[in-house]
Image (cartoon, rainbow, N blue to C red):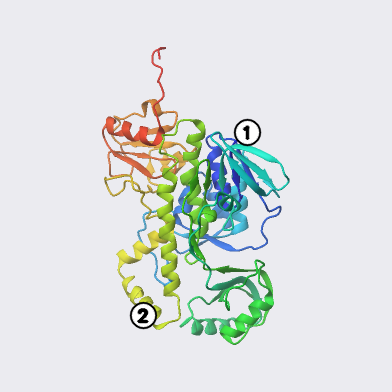
Amino acid sequence: MFDVIITGCGPTGATLAAELRLHDVRVLVLEKDTEPGSVVRIVGLHIRSLELMAMRGLLERILERGRRRPAGAYFAAIDKPAPADLDSAHAFLLGIPQPVVVQLLEDHAVALGAEVRHGTTVTGLDQDDDGVTVTLGSGEKLRTRYLVGCDGSRSTVRKLLGVGFPGEPSRNETLMGELAMSAPHEQIAATVAEIRESEKRFMIGPAGPGVYRVVIPAAGVSESKEPPTLDDFRRQLRAVAGTDFGARSARWLSRFGDATRLVDRYRVGRVLLAGDAAHIHPPIGGQGLNLGVQDAFNLGWKLAAQVRGWAPDSLLDSYQAERHPVAADVLDNTRAQTALLADEPGARAARRLLTELMEFDEVNRHLLEKISAIGVRYDFGDGPALLGRRLPDVDVKPGRLYDLLRHGRGLLLDRTGQLTTGGWSDRVDHLADPAAAVDVPALLLRPDGHVAWIGDDQPGLDQQLSRWFGDAAVVRTNGLW
């Protein structure tokens, strides 16, 4: 029997597998595709995702394969620079080909001991009080204690569970790809600038010598699940721009819709959902991959705690309690951005007003923190503003804070030198550092980097250690238990 089976080895599934392996959970990942995807779409890793990669020692490997871009002009493509003093050591966007980041995350999971089977489909599941029986397309049956569906927007696991997926279907489709074009760059740039005065969803930008990244509204919504053709792009370019700019070959082509849906439940018994299996939305602002990876960081240590037997009763349920509202907020901000991009008088007026409002630093900062997920605050009850938020990668005595989180354990950052993790020391590390760059006496970090407690008293700390890390272990002292 496996501890956890994950369906789907995209960014969410691979990240979750690695997080579970940090706690010695036996993990099997089932991926239906036998080969990496042929669409070399460039995706953006936002600030919070870059911070999470830094926490697990992956950031340098990922930076080598990507391209840094400024952190501004995300919300509805309104061209405003990011505030100069963003509260992060990684205040930029990283553009990186999706197959590259998927392979890096899968390699990381495998290096930690996860097993990945490609070319394997799931056709059935049946759960009971002790586990889940998973039926494969080959007819083989596998047994696991927990199953997590990370198998995308058409999730088989979600459908087998019968979980509701309410929301709106696609009403508009967009073509996206990288094309070689023979028209002069000056002509392309001038035409794009003119069209974008009224059609904000249209974009053509350089992607190499003679090659351009193209985003163009499509006519209607296609029923096809296949990528569009070069002729489709030429035809739509002529319809929108009056010319196809001499488009003659393509690196990759794809289409996406603006369907917006969120599951009713993230968990049914021993089966859970994460990533696009739980939520879909238009790619405006580039939040989709990031949202799934952040789901995995939230779920991984909680599910591992359940498997290892020390999870408090409510811990696994906190996955939905925390991540469902975050996804709902992402869906709402993509709905708002979609409305602001429409070519209608009301939408244009709203966009002009928001552009003016974003001149105020507070507005610009709020929207950027929303898109980049550094503004997420989980509801841990009343307390200081930092409670429930993520802690930036601050300076500490050994160097950088995030280097201390690589093993997926909790951390007590203690400036008082008077506190202890006691019977939780097998799950929570302790750093006594009076010079740590935080303005509170002490704080408790969860494995996902969110602040679970702030204070200076041992009873208060013990209460929160028990809340998040279960019962204290019996500590042996002087040869006695």
Query: Which residue lies under the disc numbered 2?
Result: 349
Count of numbered circles in the view: 2
Mark drawn on residue 1: 1
Asked whether the viewer can see residue 360, the reply is yes
Counting from the top left corner in percent of width and height, residue 279 is at 50, 57
> Which tag, 1 or 2, sits closer to the chain's start?
1
Image quadrant occupied by the C terminus: top left
Q: Is residue 239 left or right of residue 317?
A: right
Residue type highlighted by circle 2 = Ala
Relative to 203, residue 61 above or below: above
Q: CA distance from mark 1 to mark 2?
A: 59 Å
Tell me what residue is drawn at x 64 percent, y 47 percent: 124
Q: Secondary structure at mark 1?
A: loop
Quadrant of the rendered structure where residue 463 is?
top left
Residue type highlighted by circle 1 = Met
Outermost residue on the bottom side: it is 242
Outermost residue on the right side: it is 138
Q: Is residue 462 left or right of residue 63?
A: left
Relative to 397, residue 185 above or below: below
Mark drawn on residue 235: none
Disc 1 crowd rating (10 Å Cα; few below 14, some 14-19, many 20+) is few
Tell me what residue is drawn at x 40 percent, y 12 percent: 480
Q: Secondary structure at mark 2?
A: helix
Counting from the top left corner in percent of width and height, residue 159 is at 58, 53
